[in-house]
Amino acid sequence: MLQTRASILARYWYCAEECRLLFNGFESKPTEAKSRGDKIHKWLAQRPKTPTEIRLISKLEELKPFYRDYKGVRIFGTPDDYKVKRKKVALEEYKSVSGWGSVDFWEKFEYPCAEFQINTYHFIMQPILERLGYELKDLGYIYLFDRTGRFMRKYSVRFIESMYLADLDTVLAVVTGEMEPIPPKSFKCKICEFRGRGCRL
């Protein structure tokens, strides 16, 4: 069975060819943005949690790694955080930018990736949480921070299964070679790490 991660499939919405390459084992180089994101995630992981959140996280730890099989592909993914009220759970995803000057670019070109990523987490976690007796809310949240960890914006994302599965079918068709990738905006190619390193476009 083929295997991949939610974060890799999400890259389709920035560049379908980049997504195909990552899916097929090409390694992405470390970047300042990735390093910044790792620091933000570690910092936010230390936030105080409620007793209900602690109980859920404890139960989930025993079930890792999280994945769901779909049409011959095993998709792995771990949400950044959970908000729990009684037995209802909302997923949260954390993203970061260098500062306010980068927000417009992020919203136009990176937000679609984050939206698909949190919806993929929803797809993975829904049956897992149901087995534990929890209800996963259709509404998840993306939080945007700057490099210092300052909160910038919050986005609500509603999971609609039929729309998500239609998108997932398209993504999987491209990364497995059933469909040709749509070329991205030309400026992306000029700064792409895969230019001349596997890219077919």
Image (cartoon, grey):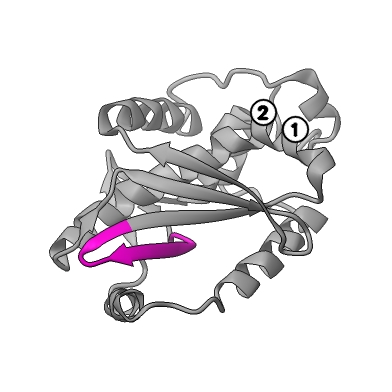
Q: Residue at x 72, y 57 (%)?
A: 34
**Real-space Cα distance between discs 1 and 2?**
5 Å
Q: Main secondary structure of the magenta part?
A: strand
Residue at 41% over, 25% down: 170
The residue segment tinted magenta is 79-89
Residue 122 falls left or right of residue 18 = left
Residue 178 in picture, x, y percent from top left = 43, 23
In terms of secondary structure, where does tag 1 sit?
A: helix
Would residue 172 appear left or right of 187 to someone viewing this image? left
Query: Mark 1: which amino acid?
Result: Phe
Residue 127, percent across and down?
Answer: 20, 55
Q: Is residue 141 left or right of residue 22?
A: left
Query: x%, y% of residue 154?
Result: 56, 46
Q: Nearer the viewer, residue 135 or 2?
A: 135
Place residue 11 in its image quadrant: top right
Q: Which quadrant holds residue 59? A: bottom left
Q: Residue at x 81, y 34 (%)?
A: 196
58 or 71, nearer to the observer: 58
Residue located beneath label 1 in the image: 105
84 is within the stretch colored magenta: yes
Name the disc covering residue 108, or none: 2
Residue drawn 34% across and 38% down? 159
CB under 8 Å between discs 1 and 2: yes
Image height of 49 relative to 194, above or below: below
